[in-house]
Image: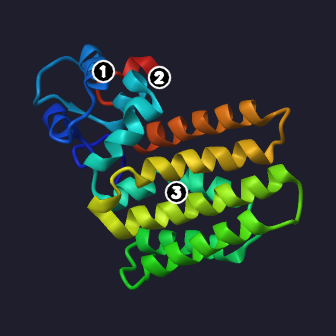
Amino acid sequence: MKGGDEYDALTLQEIRDHSPCQSDWKKLTKAVGNDMTTKLSIGDVVISNGLDDGALWCLRCLDLRKRVAAIIPAVKRAAVHSKDQRVHDCVKDIEKWLAGDNSINLYAAWAAAGSAARTAAGSAEGSHAERIAAWSAARAARTAAWAAAADAAAVDAAGSAARAAASAVGEAAGSAARTAAWAEERELQKSDLLKMFPPMILKGETE
């Protein structure tokens, strides 16, 4: 279903019920008002609070599959920096699960990506940056699988996967371009969320 509609809408009360930190809550309500019945989307939170101070945190308020679908584009971009087939198989399994295949063993996918991360950490192949990028890519896939498998036990796993994905992209760029590549990936993650969850209130901010 297309983002930004009633299916994807959150109310301020639903966000409040998940106990956001006071400073982030104030930032959000300053932008959208204080009516607890106000309906908004993750896209509105991107505009008002950014990624880590709101949007990724608020993913925990969504349906589980929506939560994971929101960060899988970033995980796929990170996976490009891993040559380990276990990482790519993990991503494929998550995508199959997102498409509705409940037969996927997400815990096995999580364990395989975790093993890939340990392999990357102990590898002597490639430059230091390439090894860190591969390790971060495996961590992104592993954490995304955990977000899908563990549900309420992994409320921040989606955000952690997105941050690991950004690290993979940044490290792969090398020391000279690391910061710029990391920042570019974070902007892409914002764009992913805005496309999936078009703003319902702060629309003018993206025009």
- Comparing marks 1 and 3, which lies closer to the viewer? 1
- Identity, as a three-letter code, of the amino acid under mark 3: Ile
Task: In this rendered view, identify the residue nearer to me: 9 or 31.
Answer: 31
Please tell me which of labels 1 and 2 falls first in the chain. 1
- Residue receiving disc 3: 72
| Number of other residues with Cα within 10 Å of mark 1, as a class: few under 14, some 14 to 19, many 20 or more | few
- Residue receiving disc 1: 23
Colour scheme shown: rainbow
- Residue receiving disc 2: 206
- Comparing marks 1 and 2, which lies closer to the viewer? 1
Q: CA distance from mark 1 to mark 2?
A: 23 Å
- Identity, as a three-letter code, of the amino acid under mark 2: Thr
Instruction: Give the image location of residue 11, x and y in percent.
Output: 17, 36
Q: Secondary structure at mark 3?
A: helix
Q: CA distance from mark 3 to mark 2?
A: 23 Å
Tag of residue 183:
none
User: What residue is shown at x 27% (from left), y 43% (from top)?
Assistant: 5
- Count of number-bearing discs: 3
Up-down relation of residue 10 to residue 201 (above or below): below
> Viewed as shown, does residue 91 lie left or right of 50?
right
Task: In this rendered view, identify the residue nearer to me: 2 or 61.
Answer: 61
Q: Secondary structure at mark 2?
A: helix
- Give the image quarter of residue 177: top right
| Number of other residues with Cα within 10 Å of mark 3, as a class: few under 14, some 14 to 19, many 20 or more | many
> Viewed as shown, does residue 198 lie left or right of 17?
right
Work out whether residue 198 can be spotted.
Answer: no
Q: CA distance from mark 1 to mark 3?
A: 28 Å
